[in-house]
Image: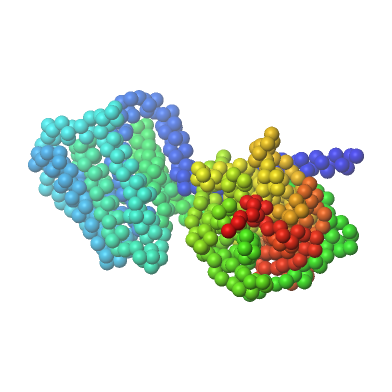
Amino acid sequence: MATIDKADARDVWLRTRYYWSLRQIFADLAKKSWMGPAVPFCVLLIIFASAAIAVPTYFTAFNIDYISRLAVGFLLVTMAMGLSLSSGGIDLSVGSIFALCNFVALLCANVLQYNIVAIFGITMLTGLILGSINGFFIGIWRTRALLTTIVTLIIYRGLYNLATSAYATDIASSSAPSSGAWNALYSGTLVKIPVSVFILIVIAVAAHVALSRSPLGTHLFAVGANRRSARNAGIKVERVLFVTYCASGVLCSLAGIFNAAFLNAAGPSVGSGLELETFAAAMIGGISFSGGSGSVGRALIGGGIIFLISNTLAQIGSSSGVAATLNGIILLVAVGVDTKWTKHKQNAIDKSYINPTYRNYGELPDTGMGTGGPFAMNDRLSDAQAIGVGQIEGPEDIILDRAGRLYGVDRRGLIFRFSGSLFESQELFAKTGGRPLGMAFDRHDNLVVCVSGMGLYSVSPDGETRKLTNKTNRGPTIIDDTMLRLTDDLDIGPDDKIYFSEGSTRFELQQWAIDGLEGRGTGRLVCYDPRTERTKTLLRDLVFCNGVCVTHDNKSVLYAETFGMRVSRYWIDGPKKGQTEVVLDHLPGGVDNINRASDGGYWMALVAMRTKAYDIAMQDPGFRIRMIKRLPQDEWLIPCMNNGCVVKLNSQFEPVESFWDPTGKAHPTVTSMREDRGYLYLAGLDNNRIGRIRLPDANPDWVASESYWGRVTR
């Protein structure tokens, strides 16, 4: 008794320990686009709180107003730097462009006394011209961005020094125009927000929309990720780079205008070192130095971090050398982290993405030949009639229409139709564009098909394909699971509602066996109502939800959990509507498709047979984690998939007999079977044929589709 208690305690401990997985949470979070700026944003909040502690007056209304107006110029230049980094380049001339535009704005405002429109127009034109020079050399002439912008940095800084030497006295001795619009730039508010901050928000929103919702943004990131691939895809790389550096110059010019209005100064230190500070800010915000990624939000977060550090150090009386040293250290750390993370991010995700959990399948049923049990191995499928040998690849499911024609799905995205007394005539019925799996006829003889990676589709009797649905309601998960990923099998209820399965929300079809190795429930049972065209998830957390079959009484839906080694029912009518119950458990293999039989029972395909070694491994998640880390994928321990097996169930869902191909020559896998007119038809995901055997005790007049919709007189 003590031994049993100890074993039970171990099961409870392992089940509890591996129920939640920090590795999986990390992998899911790392794949989210918003995760990039999440950490820098938390750092920004910590720095802001630290600044409030170091400077008691930091949270006063006056100080908040002051630093927000002061930060506008720096944040705009950081956006310009982030733009160039996202394109796969860099713009080290942003500080010099900012300084020159600051000078032009002061010259137009203080010396020439232009109005606000002229000041903005002339200054922005200056920034555009300076940026276009960078864009011309980098985009059109294809020079290196780093070397080009170092040269233009020197030239623009020299021009600034010459200009300020010539007009410093005039600017200093002149007063700013008495225009209310110009004054509003440094002291006005709009809806209780400083005007400059309000304009920054508008610019940031517009830039975000342009980068995330327009072709220009898509092209920019494509160029930044790989210029050669972008060019091969038809993107005009030269134009994208030219526009990028022009936009960078315009953003710097706007920063110069706000700085001129707020500080009214054009000293030799204006913009000095700004290129390195904004580079550090962009990197801290999560914009990769290698290009191809980035956002306005990341630039603003990184800019806020660097600005707050510099401003806080200034307010507590630290020297400029301290700020410069600290910024340099931050930049060094940011570059190091970015380089390492960019290089190893996908590898880290891959190593963390598969997270085995505890799974106890119970006692393994005896499948030995001659044992006499319902699962006893035999050779009843070995002599099955072969249909379409070499004419069809991977017929995962088959079905017959009212006329007795046979349909089979093909891994090449095709659906073939066989006709004739021996099904010797083959024709292409439809093209799906994806990997078709489960099929069912509706009452109008439309063939409804699950297409893996695409959703649920309908094929009319004349072969016209249309999409029914490719998404459902989102679940309480980190990843967005609204898109249907691995739609697998389906059946149709008496009210025309389509019940279909999704094997996994985390793995693709070619990785379906890995879902079994992990053992977690990420499958779903989903319902599509053609009358309302709405899709709803009925059940979640199923262990690779697979076969679906509406029961003969139309009151419930049977669904298989392949790697749960069980079959359950979901009530769709009657007093138990909405409830679930397990009807068959601890099976010797993973259940694939389930279909009706003529005697009121059901047919069930077993596709992944259990072994003692597999069962032991599934009870030891730690072992499977080590196996995943240390062995190549083709050496992982997965269920045996080279034995075709079909199980017959009676009307009470009890197994009564089985059909096997122990050699695996004719039917190495059986993923589906259909009874129709006295025959049992066989299909397999890895087979190159469709099989057929005669059922001596079956009703030769029973038509599968008519068991749903009745006989139609034509």
Say which of 519 and 114 sits in front. Answer: 519
Residue plotted at (55% across, 46% down): 528
In this picture, is 27 found above or below 696?
above
Residue 30 point in image, percent of width and height: 53, 48
Say which of 700 and 159 sits in front. Answer: 700
Residue plotted at (20% across, 39% down): 260
Say which of 602 and 106 sits in front. Answer: 602
Residue 24 point in image, percent of width and height: 60, 47
Asked which quadrant contains residue 237, the reply is bottom left
In this picture, is 377 found above or below 69?
below
- Residue 5 appears anywhere in the view: yes
Asked which quadrant contains residue 636, the reply is bottom right
| In this rendering, position of residue 707 left or right of residue 474 | right
Q: Check the image and name the residue furthest to the front.
A: 713
Quadrant the C terminus occupies: bottom right
Residue plotted at (37% across, 55% down): 218
Please name the colour scheme applied to the rendered image.
Answer: rainbow
Residue 263 point in image, percent of width and height: 22, 36
Say which of 103 and 697 sits in front. Answer: 697
Residue plotted at (59% across, 72% down): 426
- Residue 291 appears anywhere in the view: no
Q: Check the image and name the residue furthest to the right.
A: 1
Quadrant the N terminus occupies: top right
Residue 404 point in image, percent of width and height: 64, 64
Tally of marks: 0
